[in-house]
Image (tube, rainbow, N blue to C red):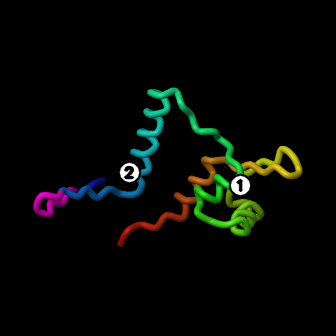
Amino acid sequence: MFEKHNFGSVEVICIESEALMHLVREVTQRIKEDTGQTLEPWVDGEEAMKILNIGKTTLQNLRNSGSIRYSQPSRKVILYERNSLYEYLESHAKEKF
């Protein structure tokens, strides 16, 4: 799950990506509970592009291929499900060597 390494006065902790994602989810949930804040489940294109670090064309390609979930409540408004963006990132994560 994780390893500790000491380099003189510096301690480095290595953690598997799946364990890290689980930890991040738990910490995020605890912060939400403690502060009463929640993240919106749907984000606009600008926020989706920031989360995925991509441009408009790539975002459209992901939408068209069904790689991410979206909703189009009106002709000019397209919203993206935040969780599907994170799931897309997780599905393309590479394991360390």
Secondary structure under the numbered disc 1 in the rendered image: helix
Amino acid on which the number 2 mark rests in the picture: Ala
In the image: residue 94, left or right of residue 75: left
Q: Residue furthest left?
A: 8
Q: Main secondary structure of the magenta part?
A: strand
Q: Is residue 71 a member of the stretch shown in magenta?
A: no
What crowding class fits label 1: few (fewer than 14 Cα within 10 Å), some (14-19), or many (20 or more)? some
Can you say whether 69 is above or below 53 in the image?
above
Residue 19 numbered tag? 2
Q: Residue at x 44, y 50 (%)?
A: 21
Image spot of residue 74 (x, y percent): 87, 46
Q: Residue at the location (63% across, 39% down)? A: 40
Which segment did they paint magenta? Answer: 4-10
- For the residues labelled 1 and 2, the Cα–Cα distance comes to 29 Å
Which quarter of the figure is the C terminus placed in? Answer: bottom left
The residue at the far bottom in this view is 97
Q: Position of residue 42 (x, y in %)?
A: 68, 43
Q: As drawn, is 77 to the left or to the right of 80?
A: right
Query: Would you identify the image quadrant in which residue 45 lies?
Result: bottom right
Instruction: Give me the residue at 18% from left, 56% from top.
Output: 11
Q: Residue 9 vs residue 77: left or right? A: left
**Marks 1 and 2: CB-CB under 8 Å?**
no
Residue under numbered circle 1: 45
Horizontal and vertical percent for residue 71? 78, 48
Secondary structure beneath dot 2 equals helix
Residue 75 drawn above or below residue 96:
above
> In which quarter of the view is residue 68 placed?
bottom right
Mark 2: few/some/many CA within 10 Å (<14, 14-19, 20+)? few
**What type is the residue that disc 1 sits on?**
Gly
Is 85 above or below relative to 36? below
Which numbered disc flags the more N-terminal residue, 1 or 2?
2
